Amino acid sequence: KNYEMAIDYLLKSFKIAQDIGDKRGTAINLANIGGCFLLIFKDTPEKTSKVTGYPEHTIKEYKSTGAIHSAKTALLPNAITYLQKSLVVCKEIHTMDLMLEVYKNLADAYELSGNYKQALENTNNYWVIKDSIFSIDNEKKIAALSYNYEIEKKQSRILFLEKDNQINATKIK
């Protein structure tokens, strides 16, 4: 669980994705960075002398005031910021699978920060996207089943006509 290293690599990957114009890669990296901050928050004990994965200069500011709990809580705005940036790109490129993950993580982050209204809103958005994905998947399955049924029906009709032709050919002889 080396979150600092993960965030460093994700930031580098994010920069590359931006440089080459890979919007999906950009959205994924932003979501993963936000997810890392969320995981750091969840994995950091309440009373700790070090908040892993958070810039050391910021931790020192919190340590000097004796507000270690605040250092942990400060992780949530970072998670939310990166997740919201990811969501903007996801909406722009209509990548529903990633939007689903981002809404779930945003709901978790807002709930952990005590912003239950935003947590509920993001949970609702999560379910709307999930239902939409489910509907799209079902439509694809129904279309595939319908297509296969029509093909089988036509093949059966062809076989029937071939046998009928064979019977008619033997009657003529």
Image (cartoon, rainbow, N blue to C red):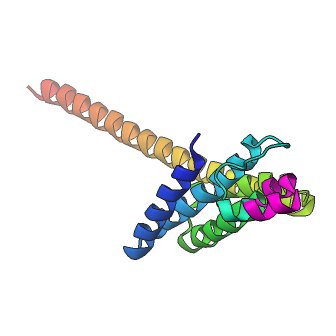
Can you say whether 5 is above or below 12 in the image? above
The percent position of residue 84, horizontal first and vertical second, equals 69, 68
Q: Nearer the viewer, residue 135 or 164?
A: 135
User: In the picture provided, is 106 more to the left or to the right than 168?
Assistant: right
Q: Position of residue 42 (x, y in %)?
A: 75, 44
Towards the viewer: 32 or 8: 8
Which of 61/107 is in front?
61
Q: Main secondary structure of the magenta part?
A: helix
Q: Is residue 134 magenta?
A: no
Return the x and y of residue 24 as percentages of the image width and height. Answer: 48, 65
Task: Read off the magenta span.
Answer: 60-74
Image quadrant where residue 118 sits: bottom right
The residue under the point 42% across, 40% down is 148
132 displayed left or right of 156: right
Say which quadrant the C terminus sits in: top left
On the picture, is 98 further left or further right than 167?
Answer: right
Q: Position of residue 107 (x, y in %)?
A: 79, 55
Quadrant where the image shows the N terminus: top right
- The residue under the point 57% across, 74% down is 92
Q: Residue furthest front?
A: 64
| Position above or below: 26 against 106 | below
Q: Do we see residue 124 in this rendering?
A: no
Q: Is residue 158 above or below residue 101?
A: above
The residue depicted at 61 percent of the width and 66 percent of the height is 86
**Residue 69 on the magenta span:** yes
The residue lying toward the viewer, choosing from 21 and 93, is 21
The answer to whether residue 22 is left or right of residue 99 is left
Can residue 85 be spotted in the picture? yes
